């Protein structure tokens, strides 16, 4: 009976060796930049249509226009073209030569963005910050929005008197999972109390409402929505944080190595040059009220 | 009497290897290896394996995230130990209340039934959400000092006490009527009978299912993360989001398995010991 065992063990070793060898030679295909960026030249998930992903619910100011009757989208329906990210997606689609009706929106939760295997989307637009670590798993477009982090708290609470990052050390802060806001707390504020982390922005708001946390760290446009739309009643933007390490750059997410990114980047740089991106920002992202810089 | 000694009914995986010679050990070893080779071959030769390997089994990310996740895992252990101690007492109380005799105790029995039905029916995740965000929203000043962690533990205690109370009840009901009759005829009062005769026998019988529920409890400590605290699962989620790689989840899974295996083996050992004792008593 010794022989079969040895054969099996040998087979195991051979198979493992083969598997290890094969993992090196993948992804060596050169990214041949498509010479012309027209819908029939592009490699798409579904031929003839641009499949754009984001998460549901679609939060303002990134998405707007509400959710029409019968729509499966919560808060806002991206197909309305309203809200900054929806508007940018349609502007890029137009530059690439897609009809409005050829843009299809799909729901892809954050954690599925980077799963291995075939992607279900051409690109995702959902306030994803570009970081070098993430770039090892996905491909990012050039930035379509740069922002800073900000602090939201309840009016009149002690934390609203904070002037510097050091003043914030003694408070309990909260952020959403998967955001660079959390990174900012841990790396730059370094509070004495462990920050609270929530699944989505609704839960973060609940944390502040129930006084489980003293303040929310979130990107500045969202901070103004929380206070302006009374998502948390009686809340105020205490201030914006200095951009340590260059601030946040939102990029569209592509499956690793997808060469569609070159065409999208070309479209984005044209939209930047002709002022469209700035116009859309002015239109959809208001920064009403002052937000002093916390030093 | 020989039913209990039938080796076919035993759950020990190595049981039938012992005492049947060298040959059977080798057969078991060879078939295990062939089976493992087939599984590995199918997985490793699949077209998506290189991508899966990179996304789930990244050594560098594993080494990076493991210490952080292990530290966060201490919180899981803390939650588990506190909740378990409270559940053991609270659930026994519920079970005893449910067994109170006579029409006068009907409201208490009914409450105990409603409690177990309700908390076995509502998903744990919802109890945590409702208590974690709901209770502090009442803005009662005496509630304010409690942290989300406290509400998370309360939720786990409420849910698991409902299960454990039912386990206790099954144990209490399995003690034969004659035991109570005998105790009463010796002059023990009803509470004394419960305390010195019924419950000691009942608890001994339900230790294995009790431990089984606690294995479930260990895993559900991860749900407390929903309302803010950073335990092992949340820490791994943070690392996954930062790296866009799923390997940190593997760290957490590993830690949970390492925690539950000793408890599972203890359960097996207790069952085996119990069977030995019962057989000894019957002989």
Image (tube, rainbow, N blue to C red):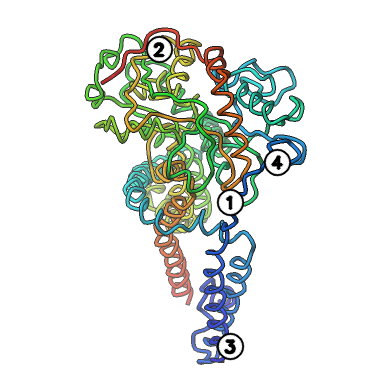
Q: CA distance from mark 3 to mark 1?
A: 36 Å
Specify few, some or many for label 3: CA neighbours under 10 Å numbering under 14, 14-19, or 20 or more.
some
Residue drawn at x 41%, y 9% is A234
Q: CA distance from mark 3 to mark 2?
A: 71 Å
Marks 4 and 2, the one that precedes in the sequence: 4
Which residue in the protein does label 3 denote? A4
Which chain hosts label 2?
A
Indicate whether B260 appears above or below A165: below
Which residue in the protein does label 4 denote? A42
Residue A192 lies in what quarter of the image? top left
Mark 3 and mark 2 on one chain: yes
Marks 2 and 1, the one that precedes in the sequence: 1
**Location of residue B203 in the rendering, given as x and y in whole percent from the top left corner:** 43, 54
Specify few, some or many for label 4: CA neighbours under 10 Å numbering under 14, 14-19, or 20 or more.
some
Which residue in the protein does label 1 denote? A116
Q: Are marks 2 and 1 in contact (CB under 8 Å)?
A: no
Which chain hosts label 3?
A
Mark 4 and mark 2 on one chain: yes
**Location of residue B207 in the rendering, given as x and y in whole percent from the top left corner:** 44, 57
Q: CA distance from mark 2 to mark 1?
A: 40 Å
Quadrant containing the N terminus of chain B is bottom right
Which chain hosts label 1?
A
Q: CA distance from mark 3 to mark 4?
A: 52 Å
B173 or B133, nearer to the observer:
B133
Which residue in the protein does label 2 denote? A235
Which chain hosts label 4?
A
């Amino acid at each position: 009976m010794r022989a079969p065992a040895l054969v099996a063990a040998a087979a195991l070793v051979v198979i493992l060796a083969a598997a290890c060898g094969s993992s090196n030679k993948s992804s060596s295909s050169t990214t041949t930049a498509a010479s012309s960026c027209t819908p029939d030249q592009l490699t798409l998930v579904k031929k003839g249509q641009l499949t754009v992903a984001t998460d549901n619910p679609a939060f303002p100011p990134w998405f707007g226009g509400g959710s029409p009757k019968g729509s499966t989208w919560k808060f806002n329906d991206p197909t309305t073209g309203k809200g900054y990210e929806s508007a940018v997606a349609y502007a890029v689609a137009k530059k690439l030569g897609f009809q409005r009706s050829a843009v299809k929106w799909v729901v892809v939760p954050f954690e599925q963005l980077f799963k291995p295997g075939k992607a279900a989307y051409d690109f995702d637009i959902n306030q994803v910050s570009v970081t070098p670590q993430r770039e090892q798993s996905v491909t990012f477009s050039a930035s379509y929005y740069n922002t800073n982090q900000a602090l939201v708290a309840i009016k009149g609470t002690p934390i609203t008197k904070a002037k510097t990052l050091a003043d914030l050390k003694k408070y309990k802060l909260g952020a959403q999972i998967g955001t660079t806001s959390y990174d900012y707390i841990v790396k730059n504020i370094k509070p004495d109390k462990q920050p609270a982390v929530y699944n989505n922005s609704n839960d973060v708001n609940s944390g502040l409402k129930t006084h489980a946390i003293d303040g929310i760290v979130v990107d500045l446009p969202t901070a103004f929505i929380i206070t302006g739309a009374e998502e948390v009643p009686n809340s105020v933007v205490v201030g914006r944080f200095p951009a340590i390490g260059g601030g946040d750059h939102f990029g569209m997410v592509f499956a690793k190595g997808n060469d569609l990114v070159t065409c999208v980047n070309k479209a984005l740089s044209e939209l930047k040059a002709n002022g469209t991106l700035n116009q859309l920002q002015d239109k959809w992202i208001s920064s009403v009220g002052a937000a002093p810089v916390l030093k | 009497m020989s039913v209990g000694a039938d080796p076919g009914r035993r759950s020990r995986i190595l049981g039938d290897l012992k005492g049947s010679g060298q040959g059977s050990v080798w057969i078991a070893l060879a078939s295990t290896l062939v089976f493992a080779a087939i599984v590995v071959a199918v997985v490793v030769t699949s077209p998506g394996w290189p991508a899966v390997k990179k996304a789930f089994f990244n050594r560098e990310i594993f080494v990076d995230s493991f210490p952080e996740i292990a530290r966060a895992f201490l919180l899981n252990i803390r939650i588990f130990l506190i909740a378990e101690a409270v559940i053991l007492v609270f659930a026994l109380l519920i079970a005893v209340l449910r067994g109170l005799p006579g029409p006068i105790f009907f409201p208490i029995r009914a409450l105990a039934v409603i409690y177990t039905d309700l908390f076995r029916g509502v998903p744990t995740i919802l109890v945590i959400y409702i208590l974690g965000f709901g209770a502090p929203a009442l803005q009662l000043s005496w509630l304010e000092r409690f942290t989300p962690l406290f509400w998370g533990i309360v939720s786990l205690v409420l849910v698991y006490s409902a299960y454990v109370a039912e386990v206790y009840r099954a144990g209490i009901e399995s003690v034969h009527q004659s035991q109570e009759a005998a105790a009463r005829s010796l002059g023990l009062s009803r509470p004394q009978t419960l305390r010195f005769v019924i419950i000691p026998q009942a608890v001994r019988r339900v230790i294995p299912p009790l431990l089984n529920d606690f294995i479930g409890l260990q895993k559900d400590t991860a749900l407390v993360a929903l309302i803010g605290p950073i335990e092992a699962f949340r820490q791994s989620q943070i690392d996954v989001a930062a790296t866009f790689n799923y390997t940190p989840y593997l760290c957490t899974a590993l830690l949970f398995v390492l925690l539950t295996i000793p408890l599972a083996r203890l359960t097996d050992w207790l069952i085996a010991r119990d069977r030995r004792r019962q057989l000894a008593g019957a002989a």
